[in-house]
Image (cartoon, grey):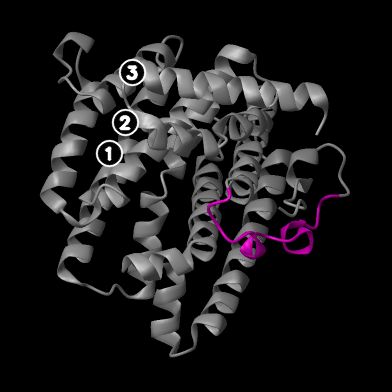
């Protein structure tokens, strides 16, 4: 990493902490140090590499909001209390559906109101509807997950995968990156089904990788993970389960790259929508790359379970017109 890039990352990290302190979503030294250690400025710089400073800062602050909500669910104990989860998300969804003056008081809702106020200008009704739908789906899935934790329910593999695709928060965050990277999902491209499949693949890769790198801490916390579900269903050891999930994840990553390459080629896409579609796919590729990179630099996870260059490399990397699909997580931390 160049000196200028490192300085930019530090500045972005500082703006995240300043924002969180100003809005009261982190208080005390321990919370400040935890947020600083997340290095969300580094995530944002990779997620929206062509964006200016304001857009990169907004991206990093949205990522901080997502992480802070997650902390309230897991570290704060809400994650196994369905009614508390419902109450939290009722407040957050109200921010997205009401005027600012009607937003309930509270640091986390105030943080979302601030982000929403700065994100919405210039967006289309279609984008706003999609973001709200994606965040509502995340809220409902998190409520469902809380019920399974409270009741000790062990989901079958298919149900767990469906739920994890929503609880990882990738789809709402992908909407944000679409906005801050100025790479909108184009109207009338004729490939909406392909874009939805690409987004689902990105969510699966991120969710399954997160489960791989946090499997040990999930066991200690008494929480489910894809590793535990596969081990239970296949009747195998934790080590074998991790190997199976790694194979699943690597296959899903190849799915992502194959879908991305096919969409970028633009076959059957109207001429006016071809470049916007390529831009959207490139933005989603940068976002997934940044997510996998971030999992390796926070110091919170076991990095040996991240994708290797061989697993991540798609077959169409030789095509110079689609360089974004050739990004891989090659750094070891």
Q: CA distance from mark 3 to mark 1?
A: 23 Å
The residue mark sitting in front, 3 or 2, is 3
Residue span colored magenta: 299-317
Q: Find out whether the residues at labels 3 and 2 contact each other: C-beta distance under 8 Å.
A: no
Residue bearing mark 3: 23
Instruction: Say whether disc 3 or disc 2 marks the residue closer to the N-terminus.
Output: 3
Residue sitting at x 37%, y 37%:
68
**Disc 2 element:** helix
Left or right? Give the position of 106 relative to 262. left
Indicate yes or no whether the magenta region holds residue 302: yes
Give the residue at x 27% y 19%.
Answer: 110
Look at the picture and state if 71 lies above or below 165. above
Q: Would residue 147 be visible to someone looking at this image? A: yes
Tell me the distance, in whole angstroms, between the alpha carbons under discs 2 and 1: 6 Å
Which element carries disc 1, helix, strand or loop? helix
Q: Nearer the viewer, residue 262 or 31?
A: 31
According to the picture, the residue beneath numbered tag 1 turns out to be 136
| Residue under numbered circle 2 | 132
**Label 2 crowding class (10 Å Cα cut-off): few <14, some 14-19, many 20+?**
some
User: Where is residue 55 drawn, in percent x and y?
Assistant: 56, 17
Left/right of residue 89 with respect to residue 174 in the rendered view:
left
Front residue of 68/196: it is 68
């Amino acid at each position: 990493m160049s000196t200028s890039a490192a300085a930019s990352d530090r500045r972005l990290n500082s703006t995240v902490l300043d924002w969180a302190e100003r809005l009261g979503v982190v208080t005390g030294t321990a919370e400040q140090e935890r947020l600083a250690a997340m290095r969300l400025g580094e995530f944002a710089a990779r997620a929206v590499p062509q964006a200016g400073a304001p857009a990169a800062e907004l991206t990093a602050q949205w990522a901080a909001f997502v992480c802070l909500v997650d902390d309230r669910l897991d570290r704060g104990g809400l994650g196994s209390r369905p009614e508390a989860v419902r109450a939290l998300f009722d407040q957050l969804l109200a921010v997205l559906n009401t005027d600012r003056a009607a937003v309930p008081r509270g640091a986390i809702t105030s943080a979302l109101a601030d982000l929403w106020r700065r994100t919405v200008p210039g967006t289309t009704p279609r984008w706003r509807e999609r973001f709200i739908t994606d965040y509502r789906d995340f809220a409902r899935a998190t409520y469902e997950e809380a019920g399974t934790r409270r009741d000790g329910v062990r989901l079958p593999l298919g149900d767990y995968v469906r739920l994890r695709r929503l609880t990882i928060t990738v789809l709402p965050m992908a909407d944000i990156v679409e906005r801050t990277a100025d790479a909108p999902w184009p109207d009338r491209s004729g490939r909406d089904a392909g874009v939805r499949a690409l987004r689902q693949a990105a969510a699966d890769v991120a969710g399954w990788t997160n489960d791989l790198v946090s499997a040990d801490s999930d066991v200690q916390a008494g929480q489910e993970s894809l590793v535990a579900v596969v081990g239970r269903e296949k009747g195998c050891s934790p080590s074998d389960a991790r190997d199976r999930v790694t194979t699943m994840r690597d296959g899903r990553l190849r799915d992502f790259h194959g879908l991305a390459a096919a969409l970028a080629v633009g076959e059957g896409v109207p001429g006016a929508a071809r470049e916007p579609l390529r831009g959207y796919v490139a933005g989603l590729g940068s976002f997934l790359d940044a997510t996998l990179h971030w999992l390796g630099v926070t110091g919170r996870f076991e990095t040996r379970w991240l994708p290797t260059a061989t697993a991540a490399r798609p077959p169409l990397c030789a095509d110079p017109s689609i360089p974004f699909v050739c990004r891989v997580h090659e750094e070891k931390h």
